[in-house]
Amino acid sequence: MANLSLGTILLVLFAVSLAGCSLGWLNFIYFISLGYGLAIALQAVSDAVMFHGGMTLPGGIICLLLFLYGVRLFSFLLVRQLKSASYNKAVMTGVSSSPRRPFRVSLMIWISCAMLYLAQASPAAFRLERIASGAVASDVSAWIGIALMIAGLCLESAADAQKSAAKKKNPHRFVDTGLYRIVRCPNYLGELVFWTGCFVTMFGIGARAIEWVIALVGYMGIAYVMFSGTRRLEIKQNSSYGDNPEYREYVKKTPILLPLVPLYSLEKHYWLKG
C-alpha cells in the first residue's frame, strides 16, 4: 500500500472516524464517549489494513494498542451505561433533558470530534506510511512510545477498576485509595500518558511539516480535554463532598492530575471549558 498518498490516507481515516462518531446521532453524549472509543478502534483497524504489506513489529504493536484502547473505552462506557443507574441519572438524563440542539450544531460537533480523533491517532498512520514509502525510521522512538502507551492503558484500566470497586463498597464516599492516593484523577492521567506515547512514536520518522501540525493539534487537543474534564470533575466532587473534612484534607495533600506536581485545583482556571 506504499502508493497511497497522504491525502488518501487522511480521507480514509477521517471517514472511519466519522463512522465511529456517528453514534452521537443516537444520543449527543455518544459523540464524546462511545463514538470516541469506536472511532479510535476503527482507525487502528484501517491502519493495519492499509499498511499490512509493510507492517513492522513496532507498527503492529502500535495498531494493536490503539485498537485495545478503543475497545476498552467503548466496552467500559457501555457496561457503565447499562449497569450504573447513577451514571444514567447524572449523565444520560441530564443530556436528554437539555434543550434540543440544532442540526447544524450536532453536525459541527460530529465533524469536529472526528477530526480531533483522527489527529490524536495520526502518528501511527504517519509512521506506517513513512516506512511503507521506504523511509528509514528509528525504532527507538517507537519502543519508547509503545512503553508509554502500555503504561497509560494499564494505568487508566486499573484506575477505573479501583474506582468501580470502591464505589460498590461505599457509593457515597469519594475515592482516595489505590492510585487515587497518588493523584485525584489517575484515569485521566493514564489517558495523557497513553496519548503522549502515541505522539512519541512519530519521532525519528522524518515526518513532513503538515504531519507534525496535525499530530500536535491532536495531542494538544486531548491534553486540553483531559484538563478540562479534570476541572469539571473537581467542581462536581467539591459540590458533593465539600462539607466533608476528610475530603478537604485529601484535596489539600493530593495533586489533582500530575504526580509530584503541586497543582491541587483547576476550579478557578476558567479557560478550561467543556
Image: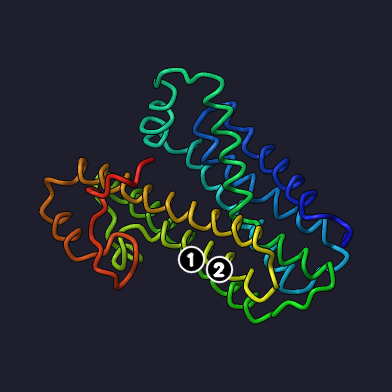
Q: Which residue in the rendered view is the most extreme toward the front?
A: 209
Quick one: SS at disc 1?
Answer: helix
Residue 74, how many percent across, how many down?
58, 46
Name the residue beneath numbered marker 2: 197
The span from disc 2 to disc 1 (Cα, nearest Å) is: 6 Å
Residue 90, how many percent across, how many down?
36, 33
Give, as a three-letter code, the residue at label 1. Val
- Foreground residue, 109 or 254? 109
Name the residue beneath numbered marker 1: 193
Q: Residue at x 23, y 55 (%)?
A: 265
Left or right? Give the position of 224 relative to 53.
left
Give, as a three-letter code, the residue at label 2. Gly
Q: Residue at x 35, y 48 (%)?
A: 168
Q: Dots 2 and 1: beta carbons under 8 Å?
A: yes
Q: Residues within 10 Å of mark 1 (few under 14, many from 20)?
A: many
Left or right? Give the position of 159 relative to 36.
left
Left or right? Give the position of 78 relative to 134.
left
